[in-house]
Amino acid sequence: MKKRILLLTPYFPYPPIHGGAVRISNLMKHLSKKYDIYLLSFVKNEEEALFSFDLKKRTGCKDIFPVLLQAHPSSSSHIDTPWEDRYFSHEMVDILKDIIKTYKIDLVQIDFIVMANYANHISGIPVIFTEHDTSNLTFEKSIHYRELNDTDRRRDWERLISYEHKICRKFNKIIVLTPEDKQQLQDFLKYKTDIRVIQTGVDIKYFKSQNAPSVKYPTITYLGHYLHYPNHDAILYFYKEMFPAISKQVPGVKLHIVGSGPTKEILELQSDPRVTVTGEVPDVREYLRKSTVFIAPLRVGGGIKGKILEAMAMKVPVVANKLGASGIPAVDGKEILIAQTTEDFTAKTVLLLKDSNLRKNIAGNARKFVEKNYDWNLISKTLSKLYDETLNTPQGLS
C-alpha cells in the first residue's frame, strides 16, 4: 500500500504563476506516482478553490482540501508568531488533525515559514519543512535594512527570526533550495538539525525551444510575481540603473515585464513606450519565445530562481548577477553570463543583444545544462528518497 503524504501550503499552487506554486504542483505530479498525495491549502476566494479539480487532474493527487483564508485573522494571542497572524486558523488546525486521523497520514510536509506554526498541532508522525527563501535571515546585512527607518518593521523582522530559530526544532528534516541557503540556515540556527538541499526543477518537455516569432526589435524580458518584494525591487533597479545606458547603445530595445501582481510603481513604467507590463499571462512561453535576452538582476532574496531555468530551457540566453544565479552552478561565459556590478550587468546585456553568435552558443549550452540537472523527474526522486528515509527512521527527531 502506498504511503500517504499530506502537503500543507499557504497559497494554492494552481495556476502555477509563481515559483513556489510551480515547485509544489510539479512535485505533486511526480510524487503521486509513488505516494498518495493529499493537499491542504489556503485559498484566497471561492473561485480559487474551483481550481482544485484542475490541479487534481493535472497532478494525479489523491485529494485536495481548500480552506478559505479569512480577511480578519482569528484571535490567537496564545500563538507565539511574530507577524499579524494572517495564516493561523482554528479551522485549519481542526481540518489538519481530522485529515491526519481519517486518512492515516504517514508524513506531513509544510511549505513556507508562515505555515510553520502548524507543526505544533501535529504529533506521532514525522514533519518535514521546506524553507523556500532564507533571505529574511540576512536581511539586516542588506541595503534595504540599512535604509529602513520604520522601527516597527525592524522589530517585526527581529521577532520573525527569533520565531524561526525556535520553530525549526519542531521538524524532522528541513529542505532548502540551494547550498547557499543551507549554509545560511545552519549558521543562523547553530543547533544540530538535518537540513537537505533539494533544488527546484523545470519541466523540460513543456519549456522547450520552438521557432521564435519574428520581432522587429531586440527584447529584454524579466519574469516574476511582483507582489514578492525581490522581484519588485529587481525590475525597478534594472529600469532605473541599467536600462537607460542599454537603450543608448542598442537603439529600439524593448523591455517586457511579464508576470502577475505588478505594483503601482511597475505599472507606471508603461508611460515609457519602450516598456510593456503584461500582468498575469496564460502562457509565459509566448513571451520567452519573443525574448532576445532574459535578465535576473536580484538584490535581495534566497532560493533558486525557477524563472532562470525556464528561460534556459527555452534557449533564451540569461544575464544574472551573483544573487540572481545563486544555486545554479552554470558556467559563466558558457551557459550563462554572470555580472559582478551594475556596470558589468549593463555591459553583458548589451554584448548579448548585439552578438547573435554568442546568444546562440550560450542558449544551446544552457538547454543542455538544464536537461542534465533540473528535470523534475530527477528532483522528485531525490525528495522521494528523503521521504523514505524519514518514514523508516524511528520517531523522535533525527
Image (cartoon, grey):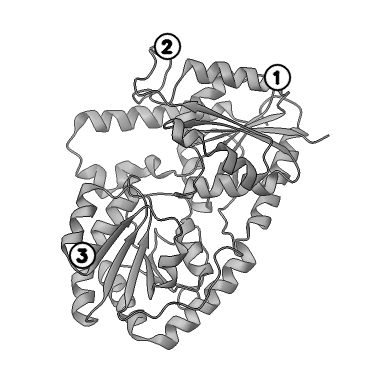
Residue 241 badge: 3
Q: Residue at x 50, y 40 (%)?
A: 131
Q: Which quarter of the image is occupied by the C terminus?
A: top right
Residue at mark 2: 78
Q: Nearer the viewer, residue 206 or 128?
A: 206
Label 1 neighbour load within 10 Å: few <14, some 14-19, many 20+: few
At 59% across and 30% down in the image, what residue appears? 171
- Rendered image: mark on residue 210: none
Q: Name the disc covering residue 102, or none.
A: 1
Answer yes or no: is residue 334 visible. no
Which of the two discs, 1 and 3, sits closer to the camera? 1
Position of 5 relative to 198 (above/below): above
Label 1 secondary element: helix
Q: Amino acid at mark 2?
A: His
Q: Residues within 10 Å of mark 2 (few under 14, many from 20)?
A: few
Left or right: 176 in relation to 135? right
Sequence-earlier tag: 2 or 1: 2
Count of numbered tags: 3
Mark positioned earlier in the residue sequence (1 or 3): 1
In which quadrant of the rendered image does the N terminus lie?
top right
State the SS at label 2: loop
- Residue 359: image quadrant is bottom left
Q: Position of residue 395 (x, y in %)?
A: 72, 25
Give amino acid for label 1. Answer: Thr
Kind of residue sitting beneath label 3:
Glu
Q: Position of residue 267 (x, y in %)?
A: 22, 53
Residue 41: in sight, yes or no?
Answer: yes
